[in-house]
Amino acid sequence: MAETLPVELLIPCDPQYLSVVRLVVAGIGGRAGLTIDDIDDLKVAVSEACTNTIDHAFADGEGAPQPATIMIRFAPRQGELRIEVEDVGQGFDPDRVPVRPDQPPSLEGGLGLYLIHQLTDSVEVQSAPGSGTKVIMTKRAAR
Amino acid sequence: MAETLPVELLIPCDPQYLSVVRLVVAGIGGRAGLTIDDIDDLKVAVSEACTNTIDHAFADGEGAPQPATIMIRFAPRQGELRIEVEDVGQGFDPDRVPVRPDQPPSLEGGLGLYLIHQLTDSVEVQSAPGSGTKVIMTKRAAR
Amino acid sequence: MKVQTKTEDDWLAVLSVSGEMDAFTAPEFRNCLDETLEKGIAWILVDLGEVEYIDSVALGILIGSAKCVTERGGGLAVVCNRTNVLRVFDISGTRELLNVCQAESESRRLLEQQRTATVNSSAPEGGQ
Amino acid sequence: MKVQTKTEDDWLAVLSVSGEMDAFTAPEFRNCLDETLEKGIAWILVDLGEVEYIDSVALGILIGSAKCVTERGGGLAVVCNRTNVLRVFDISGTRELLNVCQAESESRRLLEQQRTATVNSSAPEGGQ
Ligand SMILES: Nc1ncnc2c1ncn2[C@@H]1O[C@H](COP(=O)(O)OP(=O)(O)O)[C@@H](O)[C@H]1O
Ligand SMILES: Nc1ncnc2c1ncn2[C@@H]1O[C@H](COP(=O)(O)OP(=O)(O)O)[C@@H](O)[C@H]1O
């Protein structure tokens, strides 16, 4: 009973399923003991990561595998919920889109990763051109 | 645009995730144009199929793969929602547990498959001893 | 799912359930019932007014509970007026067995009548 | 998400939004705004009182809308009092830019003031 198996959700790269993803965030966040406020934060963070996949991962259809999907993995643990959003799209160099945690970015774009950083307790972006993207977010339950 | 890709949800064989499955049924059923009543029916039907996997698929731990999970696949189509609940457990012979659509079974058990038949528009049970189980349910949107 | 228990007039327990009653949560209902039985009360009104969902596991637990209280000389009635929940009672053909009523007053009256009948029949010569 | 548009006093349009405003639904808000602009109205009060969720795409569309109405000599203010939605405005630093107020009366007054100021400054010699 030390660790629970993750719940996995696979959706097409289509914004109409973002609301379904948020329902699952709410359901599993509740089971993991997160507060309503924490769940609200996670809903935005996870949606942003999914929207990034939809907008950027298969940008011009090139390199898009058949079919283009988003994999979201929910791993509730002792006192925290870890969520991974993964795609096998074109990837990017995370060092070239640095997020400054201290100030909001220009409003012309680039808000997504900033919100993800602000709304979770820890974020890791694993990506490289040509090899897909995985965003790993953790939210800890307040005690 | 003829057909949408399915949404897939993978949960551990654990009743605590049944409510998450129902949230997804509600979210996708809404997008597929089902009424609230139809969605309520589907919630019960899908929960019953998942509960069967939890109760019977890996009954005595034998043959249980590591890890034991339930795969739920949601395929919204023109005017209907098709949901598959699949496990790689021990399976059973569907002919030996016949469901009589005309009358409720004894109340000592055996209610699950009966409810699934009553609450959906069509059901197919693919199973055989030793080779896992797949229950395919379809609910059509009323017009 | 949550269950609240309230004892009335020393003979009746009202178990008010809210939320979803499924394979994960329904066993908790059975625990609450058993606590009530341990106090010597076997007349049970199960108020499902705030229950949004039940499935076959919940049904099974309600049926088991009804049998159990009957064996102890008591009775059980269910209050429910949500269409989707009533539908599960109807399809499974358990509405009569579980004394499902749509109004609380109705199920209360039903249990009172059953109790009067039981008391009268079990004490025929002690009758006043 | 749903949007209801109501025109008031020939100069102000109130766009009342409900539901979730995300990458799927927010473009529909922009459509409603464009319809209003086509009618020649460029003062917009966006009532998010019934909105449970917004994300960066919705923010981007609100910011684009604000720019657009300003270019046409109008203005935009947002009404919102849900904590989780306000939080997204705060973190993104867009509360001022979008004239976010917690009470409708406040945002209405704000737009009226801006309009008076605009009318006065754009017609300095026609002043009475
Ligand atoms: N899943 C992804 N696949 C490819 N590129 C991505 C992905 N996620 C983010 N990026 C890159 O990182 C940049 C910054 O993302 P973000 O902060 O969300 O802002 P925005 O989406 O508004 O550009 C994007 O413009 C894109 O180049
Ligand atoms: N996923 C499954 N894996 C193995 N056996 C199953 C599965 N689903 C159903 N069964 C078999 O079919 C029988 C009837 O199922 P059901 O109608 O749901 O009633 P119950 O679960 O109350 O027995 C079960 O007792 C079990 O033997």
Image (cartoon, coloured by chain):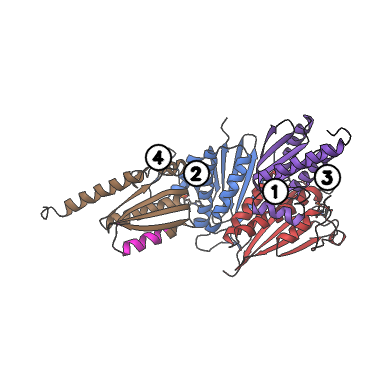
Chain colours: A red, B blue, C brown, D purple
Question: Between marks 2 and 1, how big is the CA–CA gap?
Answer: 50 Å
Label 1: how many residues lie within 10 Å, few (<14), some (14-19) or many (20+)?
many
Q: Which residue is mark 3?
A: A61
Q: Which mark is nearer the camera, 1 or 3?
A: 1
Q: Secondary structure at mark 1?
A: strand
Is A121 left or right of B121, judged from the image as shown? Answer: right
Q: Is mark 2 within 8 Å of ligand 2?
A: yes
Q: Secondary structure at mark 4?
A: loop
Q: Secondary structure at mark 3?
A: loop
Subunit ID for the residue under disc 2: B
Q: Position of residue D83 (x, y in %)?
A: 65, 54
Q: Which residues are magenta?
A: C29-42
Q: Which mark is nearer the camera, 1 or 4?
A: 1
Camera-side residue of B125 and D18 = D18
Is B65 left or right of D72, judged from the image as shown? Answer: left
The tag earlier along the polypeptide, 4 or 2, is 4
Q: Secondary structure at mark 2?
A: helix
In the current view of this chain or complex, which residue is farthest to the front?
D128
Is residue C40 located in the magenta-colored stretch of the structure? yes
Q: Which mark is nearer the camera, 3 or 4?
A: 3
Q: Which mark is residue B103?
A: 4
Q: Which residue is mark 1?
A: D101
Q: Which residue is rendered at x = 78% and y = 42% of the image?
A: D114
Q: Which residue is mark 2?
A: B116
Q: Which mark is nearer the camera, 2 or 1?
A: 1
